[in-house]
Image (cartoon, rainbow, N blue to C red):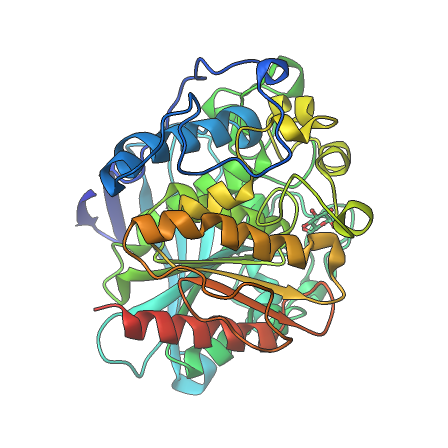
Amino acid sequence: MKLTWMRLGPFIVGLLLASCESPTMAQPFPEPAALPQTTQLPDPLVMLKGQPVETSQQWRDERRPELKALFQHYMYGVPPPTPKNVSWKLERDDAHYFGGKATKKEVTVRFGPPQTPAIHLLLVIPNKRRGPAPCFVGLNFCGNHALVDDPAIPLPDVWMPDHCPGCRDGKAAEAGRGTQKDVWALEQSIDRGYAVATCYCGDIDPDKNDFTDGVHPHFGSRGSATRGPHDWGTIAAWAWGLSRCADYLVADKDLDPRRMIVVGHSRLGKTALLAGALDERFAIVIPHQAGCGGSAPNRKTGDALQKAESVKRINTAFPHWFCDEFKKFNDEVDRLPFDQHCLIALCAPRPVLLTNAVDDQWADPDGQFQMLQGADPVYRLLGSEGLDQKSRPELDMLISGPLGYFIHGGKHSMTPDDWRVFMNYADKQFAATP
Ligand code: GCU
């Protein structure tokens, strides 16, 4: 990656020359109905046309680009290239946050054609540290104002779902302030030496089946009626937005660009995994309870057939999350030329931690463990440690290798206990990195 930046008065402008390659054209891949059916997991080390992948160079030069293109073509849709005009502005800072333990920054990140909505990034950075801080980065569900008691943080002015605390008629309200402090556990991260950067997912694309808002209309999609089968869905847009956040974060001198951890819960965990798979600047990838369309298999077996979310169900309930081509697999998931272990493998050799809760069978915790096992050969081909465990670990036992796993009692939520695990894992992985 090559990065140029300069100061223009209060503005810091970043020019991104190349950060993460993304194909812009649909690929000449077969129609779903012409793909072979296989109940087995497709081998991540065999090319679509059957050639084996035997060296790390073949993986990097041939199979990795092919898999990225396959996921974009059949599942998430094709994102636009990195815009050349990513810029940012520090709106507010406060060096006395959390009783002086942290510095807050509120940064507006702009990109694309003039009317493209901006990303409003909230950053907290520990004041006590040696050198630039490692940083968690992820999207939040209900706005930055919900994560901390701070009247200075503006309410999002874009659509927000009414189930967000304090939200009424699709609009955030004062009543939502500080109502989700535990979900992002900002102060706890500061106490452990980690910075956190987050923005409201709706800044990038409001979570509804409507392609006339968010980033979509500014990058070629003109609404649902005119969409092509491979046009990017909401999860691809969110992941691409995380990369725009990263464009800023790698230039912030208070942060360590080599220690960015992308994290997210549930639909935003699916997003974190996709962002980590496509953008190698994310050093660690933590999809929390990401489930179907993220870290759980599309090909279900055993109990998961009854208990876990299926491709058909997710495409029906959330038709905007993926590209339209993905719907063609609703009744034929066995034709997918990949499964989600290949998305994990795209992160290799960077560490990936899948975290789960026992009562969240909808997210298929057992199937997720199998996805780690499926990615193992790619990690080993690249000379990394793989996954030695043959079965899912006991509750509360962290598998802390590059293919990490954790499950505890509890339900579908992200809590301070989960953050403790994320940080234990990151501590371990960063200590292992030279
Ligand atoms: C629903 C959906 C899941 C998703 C979850 C969430 O349960 O079926 O796929 O992960 O919402 O984002 O909370």
Q: Position of residue 205 (x, y in %)?
A: 57, 39
Query: Which residue is at the front of the view, 379 or 142?
Result: 379
- Number of numbered callouts drawn: 0
Query: In which quadrant is the C terminus drawn?
Result: bottom left
Image vertical order of residue 97 relative to residue 9, above or below: below
Q: Quadrant of the N terminus?
A: top left
Where residue 191 appears, as percent x and y from the top left, is: 43, 83
Compared to residue 260, the image places residue 193 above or below, namely below
- The residue lying toward the viewer, choosing from 300 and 201, is 300
Asked whether the viewer can see residue 82, the reply is no
Residue 375 vs residue 213, the one in the foreground: 375
Which residue is depicted at the point 35% across and 60% down? 260
Q: Position of residue 53 (x, y in %)?
A: 33, 34
The picture quadrant where one finds residue 75 is top right
Q: Report the side of 155 relative to 246 (left or right).
A: right
The percent position of residue 366, horizontal first and vertical second, equals 66, 58
Q: Residue at x 72, y 65 (%)?
A: 175
Question: Is residue 51 at all visible to an observer of this figure?
Answer: yes
Whether residue 215 sits left or right of residue 314 in the image: it is left
Q: Residue furthest bottom?
A: 99
In the picture, residue 163 is in which quadrant? Answer: bottom right
Q: Residue at point 37% right, 75% down?
A: 428
User: Is 144 drawn above or below residue 346 in the view shown?
Assistant: below
Residue pictured at 53% horizontal, 73% vertical: 419
- Horizontal side, residue 412 vs residue 187: left or right: right
